[in-house]
Image (cartoon, grey):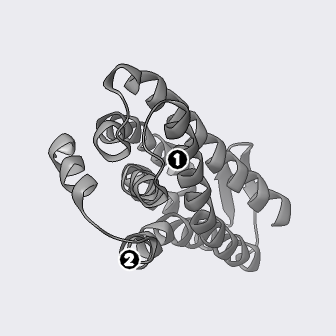
């Protein structure tokens, strides 16, 4: 409820990528794929960016597993993009700090995935990601040591990078399932 204070705490915590993945990302990244798989198995359809389409239970499970794995890879790619942007905008180059932003700043997106249990509401769940923009804006200066005068540009670029990663994952899942 107090993102600025939390980000200051997160910025000073020493950690490595492994605990962030094990304690946070493994369970959080599972929310959307598990919900989407359950919703698809029950309803027989999945709602995506391209519209609603029918899907077998086996394809739903395959898609869920693929989406989960790609989400774990995607958050790392997102962290690399954040680190690269930070370097370009005068912030610090630190992959673990960038992973903190990618993982913790995306919490609303991860939680919104629960709505995928109801295929017609799955895109509404993606709207939860809009709060992530607020979290990125609050977190980038203390965590990535980004200059305050570049926070708006940095937030915009990070948000676009996150959206591109999500679109890429969705496209790959759609191609293979």
Image quadrant in which you'd find residue 147: top left
Q: Nearer the viewer, residue 122 or 146?
A: 146
In the rendered image, the vertical position of residue 104 relative to residue 68, given as above or below: above
Residue shown at 49% from the left, 72% from the top? 30
Residue 167 x %, y %: 68, 46
Is disc 1 in contact with disc 2, using a CB cutoff of under 8 Å? no
The answer to whether 105 appears left or right of 46 in the picture is left
In this orientation, does residue 115 appear?
A: no
Mark toward the viewer: 1 or 2: 1
The answer to whether 134 appears left or right of 57 in the picture is left
Q: Nearer the viewer, residue 39 or 134?
A: 134
Image quadrant in which you'd find residue 54: bottom right
Q: Earlier in the sequence, mark 1 or mark 2?
A: 2
Position of the C terminus, as image quadrant, is bottom right
Residue 174 x %, y %: 78, 57
Secondary structure under the numbered disc 1 in the rendered image: helix
Image quadrant in which you'd find residue 129: top left
In the rendered image, the vertical position of residue 93 relative to residue 10, given as above or below: above
Residue shown at 24% from the left, 63% from the top? 13
Secondary structure under the numbered disc 2 in the rendered image: helix
In this orientation, does residue 117 appear?
A: yes
Residue 108 x %, y %: 37, 50
Numbered tag placed on residue 83 in the rendering: 1
Circle 1 Cα neighbour tier, 10 Å, few/some/many (<14 / 14–19 / ≥20): many
Instruction: Find the residue positioned furthest to the right.
Output: 175
In the rendered image, the vertical position of residue 60 relative to residue 54, given as above or below: below
Q: Nearer the viewer, residue 155 or 57?
A: 155
Numbered tag placed on residue 92 in the rendering: none
Circle 2 Cα neighbour tier, 10 Å, few/some/many (<14 / 14–19 / ≥20): few
Residue shown at 68% from the left, 67% from the top? 44
Which residue is denoted by mark 2 in the rendering?
19
Residue shown at 84% from the left, 59% from the top? 175
């Amino acid at each position: 409820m107090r993102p600025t204070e939390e980000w200051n705490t997160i910025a000073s915590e020493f950690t490595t990528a492994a605990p962030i993945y094990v304690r946070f990302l493994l369970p959080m990244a599972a929310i959307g794929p598990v919900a989407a798989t359950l919703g698809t198995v029950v309803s027989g359809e999945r709602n995506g960016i391209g519209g609603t389409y029918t899907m077998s239970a086996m394809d739903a499970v395959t898609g869920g597993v693929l989406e989960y794995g790609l989400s774990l890879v995607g958050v790392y790619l997102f962290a690399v993009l954040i680190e690269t942007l930070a370097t370009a905008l005068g912030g610090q180059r630190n992959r673990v700090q960038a992973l903190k932003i990618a993982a913790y700043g995306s919490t609303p997106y991860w939680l919104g995935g629960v709505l995928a249990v109801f295929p017609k509401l799955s895109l509404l769940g993606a709207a939860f990601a809009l709060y992530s923009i607020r979290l990125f804006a609050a977190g980038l200066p203390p965590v990535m040591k980004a200059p305050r005068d570049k926070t708006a540009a940095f937030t915009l670029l990070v948000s676009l990078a996150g959206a591109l990663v999500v679109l890429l994952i969705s496209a790959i899942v759609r191609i293979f399932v």
